[in-house]
Amino acid sequence: MDAFYASVELLRYPDLQGRAVVIGGGRRHQPELLADGTRRYATLRNYAGRGVITTATYAARDHGVHSGMGLMKAAQLAPDAVLLPVDFEAYRHYSRLFKAAVAEVAPVIEDRGIDEIYIDLSDVSGVQDAVGHDALGGVRAVAQDIRNNVRRHTGLSCSIGVTPNKLLSKIASELDKPDGLTLLTEADLATRVWPLVVRRINGIGPKAASKLNKLGVLTVGDLAQRDRPWLAEHFGRAYGAWLFDAAHGIDDRPVVTHSEPVSMSRETTFDRDLHAVRDRAELTRVFTQLAEQVATDLQRKGYAGRTIGIKLRFEDFKTVTRDLTLAQPVADATAIRQAAGLCLKRVDLKRRLRLLGVRAGSLVKV
């Protein structure tokens, strides 16, 4: 989905179309409805705190802001960008709508999160029936049907990459955003993929990319010129072999239509460091809210957790976790809050807190 959270907000606030909009604020950044029917929006210029960008419109990205960037830093780049609070309930609603819209055309789907899926088109009739010179046309027609159906059911745009495998499809889906439809065959590897920087391959993180760059490997094409022994020497046998395959567009992973979640968690970063004693009321409210959110997630998906845990990050950025395994799995907010509270008692709370989280693990179907 294209700039998913921001696009959902633009459905709600169409007057912001074309403007730089950043999603990542709190409740205090809710737009104010004025007497004349217009709205007053918060902007980054007046932001103070430690929040981060969840996503941003493409107009905001043109200023250099991006997801994961601190809002204070973003304010320096785009002070007049509109700041909106996150609304995960709305995003989950539209996520269900877009996945249902895709399933009407191509039902073999691997869920990769709230705004992204992999689709196996092998057995879809329009693809299966197309042969010879009509094959790519058949694939394009089905992909266009998917895109049209998503827009019809949600009012939102998506970008689709159609390729022989998941690795290349991830890359292709991002080449022509927003509202893109990109078909790549193995013959397109040298012209469309090899000129890209190595970070464009999903699975090459910042550290690996930095090491590759220091070794003179800047693009996917540079990586494709290195042989397996060289990559194994510098990155280990397994990761080196994967890098070689990835650079050559090789990926045999199937589309996995079902997987069990390992855990479910909710966490929040505070706008200011909170003290366990002086800010007890605020911490108690947030702690209870996080437990309620985890309970809602568990109940909605039909799970209960046997292990309840907490995550704390202090003012010095040190992070600690504590877990408690229960005799019976739980899914109600009261039980989760009680178990998380017992975990909290095992932590020295003399330092101020930056972040607080609650997690349910060892999940079982109920």
Image (spheres, rainbow, N blue to C red):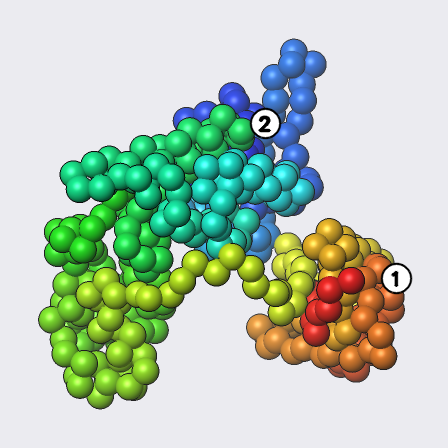
Does residue 137 appear in the picture of this structure?
yes
Q: Which residue is mark 1?
A: 334
Q: Around disc 1, counting alpha carbons within 10 Å, would you say few (fewer than 14), some (14 to 19), or many (20 or more)?
A: some
Q: Can you name the residue that lies furthest to the top here? A: 36
* Contact between labelled residues 1 and 2, with CB atoms less than 8 Å apart: no
Mark sitting on residue 31: none
- At which x and y percent is residue 69? 46, 54
Q: Quadrant of the C terminus?
A: bottom right
Toward the viewer: 350 or 155? 155
Q: Secondary structure at mark 2?
A: helix
Q: Position of residue 207 (x, y in %)?
A: 34, 73
Q: Amino acid at mark 2?
A: Arg
Vertical placement of 151 versus 23: above or below? above
Looking at the image, tell me whether mark 2 or mark 1 is earlier in sequence order. 2
Q: Is residue 63 left or right of residue 355?
A: left
Location of residue 307 with respect to 354 vertically, above or below: below
Q: Residue at x 51, y 21 (%)?
A: 15
Look at the picture and state if 43 lies above or below 173. Answer: above
Is residue 160 shown left or right of residue 327?
left
Residue at point 61% right, 22% down? 39
Q: Quadrant of residue 127?
A: top left
Residue at horizontal 22%, vertical 41%? Answer: 131
- Judged left or right of residue 333, residue 257 is left
- Residue at the disc numbered 2: 12
